[in-house]
Amino acid sequence: MNVLLVDDEPLELEQLEYLIHPLFPFWNLYKASDSCQATAISQKVKIHLAFLDINLPGKSGLELGEELRQHNQDIELIIVTAYQNFHYAKQSIRLGVVDYMTKPVIQSELVDILSKYRNKMPQSKYSHVIHDALTIIHEKFAEKLALADLAAEVHINPTYLSRRFHDEVGVSFSEYLMQYRIQISKKYLVSHPDWSISTVSEKSGFNSQHYFCTIFRKSTSQTPKEYREKEK
């Protein structure tokens, strides 16, 4: 499923992505900070579900929703706003908005809203065993997770899993796990400014802050501290 997240506040976008991704690791999440970026994305990719902030620079989220609906009648719209306004609610109903969420987004509320989409997931491009392996990685990335442990959970031989994983995903199990942990650490650095680098390292699944910083810099050409400052 292709999901569009539109908000002019970077932290709000990061939070939505951070909350949605663990629930639906195989969804494709596209982020935009205004209606122009959102429209450009929707012209390249068929969007199935869009989270739209009402107050955007230029066109409002409701105007954007109307435009998206004109080009894609099947799109489902969820309005996200810091304002509880009856006028907005009326316009949302007219647009056929499926849900209306207020900021700050509460995880339990988001889970309730998205629960109906669990059975709408399209067929994965991965085989069943690799789909299960990726799901486990996305759930247990913060734990010590070896290939042998993963193979035991999906009930196949480690050597076979290693070969199958590389063939289907395009990188090795260890490389994918490392890349995923780095992506998670980026979210933590931005969404938890109060966390120390050591805490981010541990929460992301690294058992050494020094090793985390080395891998992070190799991956992003920045230190974790530099990345956090840049993304503020």
Image: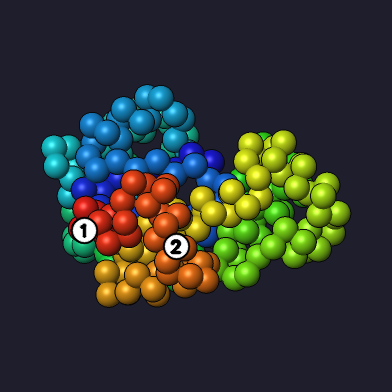
Q: Quick one: quadrant of the C terminus?
A: bottom left
Q: Earlier in the sequence, mark 2 or mark 1?
A: 2
Between 131 and 181, the residue placed more toward the observer is 181
Query: How far is disc 2 from disc 1 in space, using C-alphas?
Result: 17 Å
Disc 2 marks which amino acid? Phe
Q: Nearer the viewer, residue 177 or 67?
A: 177
Front of the two marks 2 and 1: 2
Give the structural element (helix, strand or loop) at label 2: helix
Between 207 and 36, the one lying in front of the other is 207
**Residue at label 1?**
229
Residues under numbered marks 2 and 1 in contact, where contact means CB atoms less than 8 Å apart: no
Graded by Cα atoms within 10 Å as few (under 14), some (14 to 19) or many (20 or more), the crowding at tag 2 reads many
Q: Amino acid at mark 1?
A: Glu
Left or right of 81, for residue 160: right
Disc number placed over residue 212 in the picture, else none: 2
Q: Secondary structure at mark 1?
A: helix
